[in-house]
Image: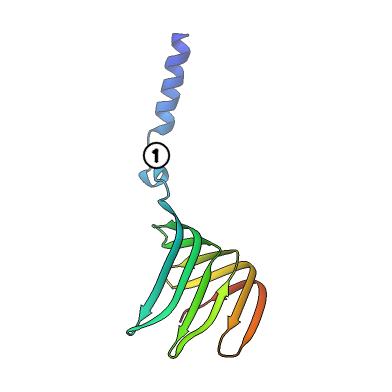
Amino acid sequence: MLKQLFLGMMLFFFSCAGKNDSENKTQRLTAISFLSLSSYSNGGKNWDIKCLKAEIDESKKIINCEKPFIVAIGGSGPDSQIKGEFGVLDLNSNNAFIREKVKVISLKEKMTLYSSKFYFDSS
């Protein structure tokens, strides 16, 4: 019994030895309810996003969003509203991908578009 325990401990020790720290790092995720973010540039607001629930990946700067609601803002105020079931917001590019039951409302054109997915490019 003692030999088996010793052998098991040695196998465990050698299986962990030599592993790179990057292999052992865990992903840093933050979960939050009722997230609200805004993007600003040149002194004005570009867009607002609200999520019922969100999971933030701090290392990749990505937000996975449940029930996203985006308001795109132009020079004269809100241009359009976008909502869906799930979304991914890339904080590096400020772009979003929305999927499932997507509804886009153009406030200027007074038009509504329904889709299964939508890519929002904030530039």
Outermost residue, left side: 43
Check the image and report above or below for 1 versus 53.
above
Quadrant in the picture for residue 18: top left
| Residue named by callout 1 | 19
Q: Which of 109 and 121 is in front in this view?
A: 109
Q: Which residue occupies 36% across, 44% down?
A: 21
Residue 9, given in percent of the width and then of the height, sits at: 42, 21
In x, y percent, where is residue 116?
A: 67, 70
Residue type of the residue flagged with mark 1: Lys
Relative vertical location of residue 98 with respect to residue 56 in this rendering, above or below: below
- Between 104 and 10, the residue placed more toward the observer is 104
Q: Assign the C terminus to one quadrant of the image.
A: bottom left
Quarter where residue 99 is shown: bottom right
The picture quadrant where one finds residue 46 is: bottom left
Residue 19 vertical placement versus 8 (above, below): below
Farthest top residue in view: 1
Q: Is mark 1 on a helix, strand or loop?
A: loop
> In the image, what residue occupies the spot 54% across and 82% down?
80
